[in-house]
Image (cartoon, rainbow, N blue to C red):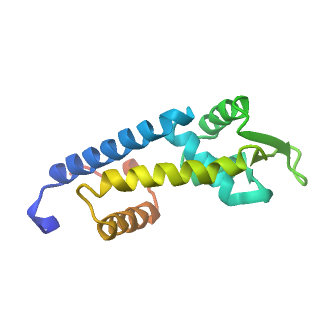
């Protein structure tokens, strides 16, 4: 099927259904770890940052969400013993966030288990290549510069 064979509302519904399905399944897989998808995304970002950590403001930008939301989520992760915060060496106003030493080894274990379960679930209908293509397309769409719809669109 070519994109021109479907309407924008059909495409929107399909994308929304796919998003909900992936979100529901990933949330289910994260449940034993008492973690939400956004908490897991933050953990993953901090894991990739390693020993250098990440500024709270950079996390918000990377996750395309508000500083307030990231701060609230970090408070929860800190209470669970998953992250710790430290003052930035050059900027006293900024905080750097790290995974706790105790949690770092758990990230690989959780990723392996969730990745295996997600792959088994997806492979019921989607090949590895199709999923890789899907991820690649999402990455391209996510990289398109955002714009203010109200400023750039004038109804006729």
| Residue 61 visible in image | no
The residue under the point 35% across, 54% down is 120
| Figure check: 29 above or below 11 | above
Q: Is residue 122 above or below residue 145?
A: above
The image position of residue 55, as x and y in percent, is 74, 50
- Identified at 79% across, 57% down, the residue is 51
Residue 81 found in image quarter: top right
Q: In the rendered view, does 95 fall on the left or right side of 65?
A: right
Q: Residue at x 23, y 49 (%)?
A: 12
Q: How many marks?
A: 0
Side (left or right) of 132 relative to 99: left
Q: On the rendered image, what quadrant is the N terminus found in?
A: bottom left
Relative depth, front residue between 129 and 147 = 129
Q: Could you tell whether 99 is left or right of 4 in the image? A: right
Residue drawn at x 66%, y 59% is 48
Q: Position of residue 87 (x, y in %)?
A: 87, 44
The percent position of residue 58, horizontal first and vertical second, equals: 67, 52
Q: Is residue 151 above or below residue 102?
A: below
How far from the left and from the top, in percent, is residue 66? 58, 40
Q: Is residue 27 visible?
A: yes
Between 134 and 34, the one nearer to me in the picture: 34
């Amino acid at each position: 099927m070519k994109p021109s064979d479907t309407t924008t509302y059909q495409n929107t519904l399909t994308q929304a259904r796919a998003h909900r399905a992936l979100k529901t399944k990933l949330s289910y897989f994260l449940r034993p770890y008492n973690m939400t998808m956004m908490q897991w995304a933050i953990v993953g970002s901090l894991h990739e940052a390693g020993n250098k950590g990440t500024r709270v403001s950079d996390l918000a930008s990377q996750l395309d969400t508000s500083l307030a939301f990231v701060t609230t989520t970090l408070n929860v992760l800190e209470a669970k013993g998953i992250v710790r915060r430290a003052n930035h060496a050059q900027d006293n106003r900024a905080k750097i966030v790290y995974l706790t030493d105790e949690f770092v080894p758990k990230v690989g274990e959780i990723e392996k288990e969730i990745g295996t379960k997600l792959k088994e679930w997806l492979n019921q209908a989607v090949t590895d290549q199709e999923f890789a293509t899907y991820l690649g397309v999402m990455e391209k769409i996510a990289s398109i510069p955002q714009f203010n719809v109200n400023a750039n669109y004038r109804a006729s």
